[in-house]
Image: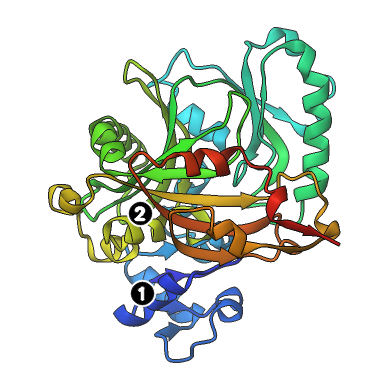
Amino acid sequence: MILIGKPYVSDFLTKTIKENNFQLVATKEAKELISDDSLNWISEITANNIIKENPNQLIYSNSENNISWVENNLGATKRPKQIQVFKNKIKLRELLKDVYPKYFFKGVKYEELDSLSVHDLPFPFIIKPAIGFFSLGVHKVDEPSEWNEVLTKIKTDIEHIKGFYPAEVLDTNYFIIEECIKGEEYAIDCYYNTKGEAVILNIMHHIFSSGKDVSDRVYSTSKEIITSNLNTIQNLVNIIGEKVDLKNFPIHIEVRIDSKGTIIPIEVNPMRFGGWCTTGDLSWYAFGINSYEYFLYGKKPNWEEIFKEKEAKKYSLILLDNNSGIKDTDIASFDYDKLLSDFENPLVLRKINIGEYPIFGFIFTETSEGNEAELKSILTSNLRKYIVKK
């Protein structure tokens, strides 16, 4: 069963639903995003009845906008409570406190930030909404002298981003302050099967331009990235699954792994893979893995077979967020052709209306070994070279 919600559904996911005749719940948002009447649409009442008869029914959601639907319709199942453990970063830290007893975190109400005594906090630290999405409202504070500037940025962020997503997805009433996790950052798509076994479908290296960078600009995957981190990540997702008793449940996890191999989760996103149909689709273009089919059919990747022809390629997801400093209202257009010409082998381009969401779109790329300069270039770009002002 599939739940489709805003802001976006990809052609690839829609095609997957059609080719497999997957049940698609006919919610208002789903009908607004997909106009194909030939799909296997089922009413919300029918979906509810199916789940009542089988609480372990497989459900994939492309968007966290569907969380309210789950809470309103699946109260008799474990899913609403499982979702809340993951969506609220404070609850997630409390869940894993026995695994990471020395890890510092603190929940703070937004209205208490002005009176917060930061000198009592361990530096450096990260502050972000307790319920958040897409690195929105995330800031790193290296020393006390930076706090007032960061606080001003947080207030500006809230004014800019409020209204883009429902409270279940992005809620700026509570923030979490936590210690900076050292090491390289990775994003993982996986699911828990009917037996509760964790099946990893993709591992992506989240690349940053500097120590201050908290953006989601570039995620890359490859044979080397997956094979060198698979065992370490498998151990963590096993622990998470056992603690929350996850079965028939997809998740998207972000973690950091330090030079000693110590792994600490940053966040866990429930019932989906990467937002905006990103990482779930990338696994297909990179490795021929249809993550949606793998979850709904209970399939496991045969990595040895998959990597036979993927020796020297890196596959990347690039988020074209507006970091130009140019207001959305002052932008006439974006030169996508010029953007594509800067990449060796662009695979997919997805354009987004900057007037509706604060991004220009996404591109998936294939990069040969030795040509990583194109990824470093887009990572540090303010995108002004592609923007046409009014």
Residue under label 1, please give it: 16
- Residue 24 picture location, percent across and down: 43, 77
Residue under label 2, please give it: 249
Question: Local crowd at mark 1 within 10 Å, few (<14), some, or many (≥20)?
Answer: some
Question: Is 306 rendered above or below residue 205?
Answer: below
Left or right of 262? Residue 135 is right
Question: Is 325 rendered above or below residue 211?
Answer: below
Is residue 73 something one can see in this rendering? yes
Which one is closest to the eye, mark 1 or mark 2? 1
Left or right of 17? Residue 295 is left
Return the residue nearer the eye: 384 or 43: 384
Say which residue appears at 41% left-offset and 44% top-offset.
220
> Which tag, 1 or 2, sits closer to the chain's start?
1
- Residue 173 picture location, percent across and down: 74, 40
Question: Is 103 rendered above or below residue 324?
Answer: above
In the picture as drawn, the residue positioned furthest to the bottom comes out as 38
Return the residue nearer the eye: 218 or 277: 218
Quadrant in the picture for residue 286: bottom left
Say which residue appears at 52% left-offset and 64% top-offset.
349
**Considering the image in quadrants, where does the C terminus appear?**
bottom right
Residue type at numbered disc 1: Thr
